[in-house]
Structures are given as structure tokens and as C-alpha cells.
Image (cartoon, grey):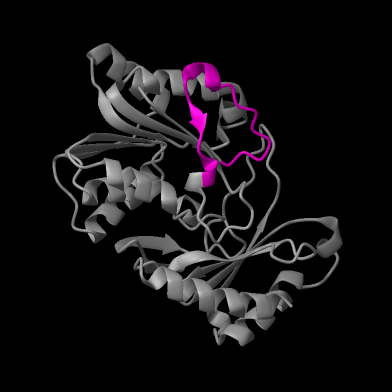
Amino acid sequence: MTANRAAKNLKHWQKRLAREKTTVFRLFDQDIPEVRVVIDWYDGDLVFAEYEREQTSTVPQYLESLGAAVAEALGVDASRCHYKRRHTRHEGDTAGRYGASGQRAEKIVHESGHRFSVDLASHIDTGLFADHRPTRQWVAREARGKRFLNLYGYTGSFTVYAAAAGARETVTVDRSRQYLERAHHNMALNALLGSQHRFEARDCLAFLNEARLSGARYDLIVLDPPSFSTAGEDPELEVLRDHRRMVEAALATLEVEGQLWFSTNHQRFEPDLERLGLREVTDKTVAPEYRNRNAHRAWWTRR
């Protein structure tokens, strides 16, 4: 049943998204309730992910067996199938982000005509979150001539959209130099490098504080923090606890008539944002092929 559904979905979404010049999308999003697996299509490669649970942990090679059936139905070689097992993460949990193989499987994919480098094997995440495709398109529609700030910028996908749309300036901030190197690479893939595009290996809250004190202002801000950020055994950031002060710090650097997007994929997120003037826009920011409309939640405001 899963293989048949995946084949049907591939035919539908591949044809529809080809018009957007997009080759990355969710192929199967727990379409069958008993199969708690998600499958993503990366231009001919398949990524299978399952949250570990008791019902399947005792079944030898459960995910791989399911993957083999899907791959056969789609005509995909087994070497192009990649498997990820996730577990629910709790505060203070520093379990690795890496997949079981530890091997890299890099390729270039396309989204809205832009080029992105993804790694399908070595990390739990590939470097491109397809659920936020509509959010990136929204940012691009607003970016021409604007100063854009990408906080917790990860691999810079929002920055690519803003720069390609004609942003006057972009700043991508992330503590991880490794992620910023990948963001720089994605910008280079799209011929978007230049002195107007900066990459800051900084703590985002410290960066915002300095920006406020120096009088720096931005017209568009994307604030998409991880659920947890740890150093050693002590949590430095926890989105449930810290999201209000993060949003307040970002708003302090937002230009008059500027726009702020805040997003989280924390599954038990309880927002405290209405008093800050943000309204939830999740129904407009999750890609349509995602049956699970809680892939992330997003809020927006115009100052």
C-alpha cells in the first residue's frame, strides 16, 4: 500500500512542481496512519525517515524492507535509498544529528529554480527543509531592495531566495561555521556572492544585541531557531523557554514597515507571541504536499 501511494504521489507532485523548477518534495507523509514513515524525493534519490517506536523496533530491517518495496515501485536503484531513524528529543539531550552510515552523499537539487547542495546520508537533516518552500517564496516576493537578516541561518536557503530576488543586503547568522560554509557554498552555486552578502559565525542573541546598540536595522528578518541548542551538557537555548526574548530582540532591529517571520518545528510549542503583535500564518507556510500540517509552525508581523 505504501509503495502504491508513493508511486501515485510521485506522478502528481513531480508534474506539478516541475512548473516551479523544483525537484525536492515530500513524497509520503504518513499517508497511511499505520505507517509512521516519511519519504522525501530528492531528484531521483529517496530519503526514508521513521521516528523510532516499539512496534517497529523489534522488526528486523523494517524501514529497509519498506524502502525496497517503494524503490521497486518507483524504479529507483537501492543505492539511491537513504534511511534515517529519529527519536523524540528532550531538553538536555545531545544525541547525534548524524545518520547511521556516517557517509556523505552529496548532490545538487533545485527548488524554485535555485540550486542547493544537500547531503542525503551523513546527517539526520539533509540541509534543505522542503516544508518551508512557501515561506521562502514569500520572503522572495518581499526582498527586492531590502536589507535581509537570516537568524539561525543553517545552510542559507532563505538567504539564497532573498539575494536572488534582489535584496540590497543580506546577513546570515549562525554559530556553526560548518553551516555557514554550506550557506556560502549555496550562494556560490547560484552566483550570488558579493560584499553585500555577509556571513556571521555568531550567537544570534549577541548579534541582535550589538545590532540594536549600533542602530543597525533590517527590513526583512527570518528567525527560525532550533528547538534546542547545547554546548556540552548544558542547554544554551530552548525554544519553549526563550522564544519570546528572541522575538523581542529581533523586533528591536526591525525597520519601520519591516517584516518578521518566526518559525519553529517543536512539536509541543506553546507560543507567547500575540502580545508582541505576531499572528500565526502556518496555513500559508507549509508546503502543500505535507499532509502533516504541523511540520512547522510560523508567525508573522509587520512593524
Instruction: Compare residues 136 and 37 and report the one nearer the observer.
Output: 136
Residue 146 magenta-drawn?
A: no
Q: Is residue 118 at all visible to an observer of this figure?
A: yes
Q: Position of residue 224 (x, y in %)?
A: 46, 37
In this view, the residue farthest toward the top is 213
Residue 268 magenta-drawn?
A: yes
Q: Quadrant of the C terminus?
A: top left
Q: Position of residue 88 (x, y in %)?
A: 70, 45
* Residue 269, quarter of the rendered image: top right
Q: Is residue 244 left or right of residue 151?
A: right
**Mostly what secondary structure, the magenta segment?**
loop
Q: Is residue 51 left or right of residue 105?
A: right
* Number of marks drawn: 0
The residue segment tinted magenta is 265-283
Residue at 36% x, 42% y is 177
Instruction: Compare residues 153 and 236 and report the one nearer the observer.
Output: 153
* Residue 214, quarter of the rendered image: top left
